[in-house]
Image (tube, grey):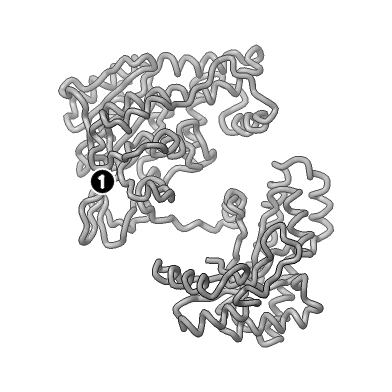
Amino acid sequence: MHLTCRCLSKEKIDATLEEAKNNGIVNLLCLRGDPPHGIKEYDSSKDYFQYAEDLVKYVREMYGDYFSICVAGYPATHVESKSKEEDLYYLKRKVDAGADFIITQLFYDPDEYLDYVKDCRNFGINVPILPGLLPVQNYNSFKRITDLCRIKIPKELQEKLEKIRNDDEKVKECGVENCYSICKKLLENGVNGIHFYTMNLEKSVNDILKKLDLKIPPKIRELPWKKVTNPKRVTENVRPIFWKNNSKSYLSKTWYWDEFPNGIWGDSRSPAFGNLTDHFLSFCKDYIPSKDSTKKIKQLKKMWGDKISNLDDISTVFLNYIDGNIKKLPWCEESELQNEVTLITDILYLLNKNHIFTINSQPPVNGTPSTDAYVGWGPNDGYVYQKMYVEFFIEKSKLEKMIKIINKYPSIYYQAVNKNGEVIQVSSQSGQTVIALTWGVFPNREIIQPTVYDSDVFLIWKDEAFSLWNEWIRLYLEDEEKSPESVEILSAIRDEYYLMTIVDNDYIFPKTFEMAKEFLNEY
């Protein structure tokens, strides 16, 4: 947590530190801080502390070793320091006051950092010093921050960026390549930790880590879907599975709900629940891209194809998503698949290769520890369970053959609907069906059931699911005369295919794999 001296009274600092401790926060970055934005002549006399050294010393006096404290270092020398020696003198005072380690200001010359570490060691500063790196994301912001902080820019990087300054995509690619080469040199010189300034733009950092072949450790999820930080929704703990990979869409639909039908999700007659039908994406055939959207269309075509000539082209896109080669489908906005999907890639490959296009799925789980890297979620020392679920688009003749085979397996529940609302549902079911799909058992807590299947909600979700084909179709509307088959093929799927869901209620000995292989062998 960043903690600065600016605009903070002693009372505010005390309250902040106490709140941090009460919430289990143990790491602090203590800074003097900059004046509030827009104030040229800031009067710091009212601030309780004037310098980071004072703040570090106070935290140590009040809390001992409870907090791990980091302070800032400046390879290019702080803009207010008269010399490198003076800068190192004040850094040593911060360390002597109780700082555990240092993160540097950003730099673009790895030798500058390596020399800085040597200078620190010669000055008696012996705590770890993490290099702080900011990949170049945008030319103007890069120039602004480097000029402000007097950051030295290597001549080669400066010349390269000048040539491509008006092409944001190329600037980002250059930033990734440059930062990768810096990281490589630092790691080769024994640096054992790197701090990235992401500025909430993590894609470049992920690309750099992949180029370095550094695997990002899997995050144990709090819930099987992304939890919202909004205080109004912090207690929400149940959702229908249909928006699992598209939480932004789900939130936009339910943001103004006055109630959240967590424990009573099955009652779709809830006044709040009914609002779902009012919001779903829709693009008309007359859509004409604006200048602002041209760049986005270019990016999407790179992922989904400049041209769709046949169903195999569509299969390739879905398979690329499963393989992680592309990060988005119209139905999947969460940047990449969750780890658990790797457990069922075989069946997903088989379906998509046979022009059955999967948009949502989860593997069966029977009492796996909640800390598992693939399917784990929730508190430690618990166990998680889930039923296998697959959702896909399928053409009618295949659907009819699949149903004949599914009927041999009583544990499998299915439901299918086309764009016009014509429903095909397992005959033994009548009325609304609500099925718990995911649940967890944790010490001293009730069973948590965060994901459900609701047959009524499925019929609400289908409007959005079919309309999302339009997000793909619109890429080719501008030049439809050049490639009419792209619009024709995608439109035919939207208008003629069925959206189908399969829930395998036997989570111990699931039959979905067996059913799918039998279907594909017969087909």
Q: Between 174 and 148, which is closer to the camera in this rendering?
A: 148
The secondary element bearing badge 1 is classed as strand
The x and y percentages for residue 421 are 34, 16
Task: Describe residue 60's horizontal placement relative to residue 250 as left or right.
Answer: right
The x and y percentages for residue 267 are 23, 32
Q: Between 375 and 478, which is closer to the camera in this rendering?
A: 478
The x and y percentages for residue 126 are 62, 83
Q: Quadrant of residue 132?
A: bottom right
The x and y percentages for residue 228 are 42, 47
| Vertical placement of residue 341 versus 102, above or below | above
**Residue at 31% across / 61% down in the picture?**
380
Q: Quadrant of residue 240?
A: top left
Instruction: Please state, as top left, top right, bottom left or bottom right, where the C terminus lies in the image.
Output: top left
Q: Is residue 191 visible?
A: no
| Vertical placement of residue 484 versus 387, above or below | above
**Residue at 26% across / 37% down in the picture?**
265
The residue where tag 1 is placed is 449
Q: Between 150 and 427, which is closer to the camera in this rendering?
A: 150
Q: Is residue 156 visible?
A: yes
Q: What crowding class fits label 1: few (fewer than 14 Cα within 10 Å), some (14-19), or many (20 or more)?
A: many
The three-letter code of the residue at mark 1 reads: Gln
Task: Describe residue 498's horizontal placement relative to residue 334 as left or right.
Answer: left
Task: Describe residue 93's horizontal placement relative to residue 361 as left or right.
Answer: right
**Residue at 70% across / 41% down in the picture?**
169
